[in-house]
Image: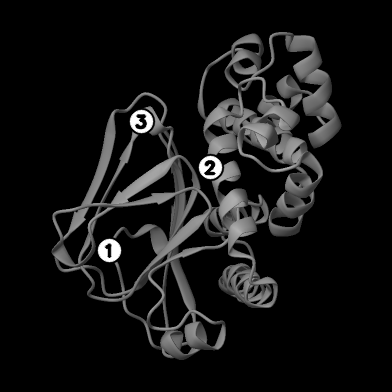
Amino acid sequence: MYTNNAYLNNSLIDIKDKSKPLIVTSCGTYKLYTRPKLPTWRPKGRVDFQLLYIAAGKAHFHFEGAEEETIVSAGHMVLYRPKEPQKYEYYGKEQTEVYWVHFTGNNVTNLLRSYGLTDDKKVFYCGSGFEYQNLFRAMIYELQMCKDNYPEMLEMYLRQIFIKLQRYFKSCIKTDNSHAAEEVDKATAYFSEHYSEQINIDSYAEQNHVSTSWFIRNFKLYTGFTPMQYILSKRIYNAEALLQGTQYNITEIAQIVGYDNPLYFSRIFKKMKGLSPSEYRKNMQV
């Protein structure tokens, strides 16, 4: 399992702080590879707010003490408010990847409402672009390094996430194309699970009874990527995680993310990230 977490003042205890309107207290990410299950059970909830982003795979939630589970797929977020019971599980077989942030403050509820995160929003689709992951990773790094004015930077990154959500909610109201949204949602979930396989976009569109041009146009409208750009970004992003958090060699990582030729993988990786895989891993270890 790959983990990368950061905590304010290195404290694992959830806190309620009303000294400022918005304060980030902890953030992190989990990605399950071989661990079979990662459960969380907080019967009394927490005293702060928690936002989770399902970046890949699925998460299994039990809301309000219900025995039946709510399966939340990639591209969705879940928002917990203070004192809400929290019970959920991730499974390694689904290769779940989740980002999370805890936050508090003296005006959080009103701030959330102003960004469209009204009191009824608990589970919501937000799109599957990589901008969310980048913002979460920037928060993690900021809280780990604690450079000058890092609390303000953390707030800025979290507000950027809120703004992206607000824009997405408004764009959905304007387009109001539920069929297209469902098709893109289904496609991103499929690509997230099968990104390491050979995927033919023409064949995928045909199997789902839509034209290739319609599918590509709507996929880009909702995610900001063409389908192949999305798959490529997914491969490179997961390669980054493997380079950072595992001891797999470059050939093994290339195969895991879908490349039989490690040299071709290295060329693609360098084109995307500006460094070869070995250079990238070396920089991460400094």
- Say which quadrant the C terminus sits in: top right
Residue drawn at (60%, 50%) of the image: 183
Q: With respect to residue 99, does 238 lie above or below? A: above
Q: Which mark is residue 191?
A: none
Q: With respect to residue 129, does 23 lie above or below? A: below
Q: Is residue 219 left or right of residue 66?
A: right
| Alpha carbon separation for disc pair 1 and 2 | 34 Å
Residue drawn at (49%, 48%) of the image: 74
Residue drawn at (69%, 27%) of the image: 203
Residue drawn at (73%, 32%) of the image: 201
- Percent across and percent down for residue 21 are 49, 87
According to the picture, the residue beneath numbered tag 2 turns out to be 189
- Percent across and percent down for residue 56 are 50, 42
According to the picture, the residue beneath numbered tag 3 turns out to be 92
N-term mark: 3 or 2: 3
Amino acid type assigned to the residue bearing label 2 in the image: Ala
Q: Which mark is residue 13?
A: 1
Amino acid type assigned to the residue bearing label 3 in the image: Gly
Please rate how many residues cluster around mark 1, counting C-alpha atoms within 10 Å: few if below 14, some from 14 to 19, many from 20: few
N-term mark: 1 or 2: 1
Which numbered mark, 3 or 2, is in the foreground of this view? Answer: 2
Which numbered mark, 1 or 2, is in the foreground of this view? Answer: 2
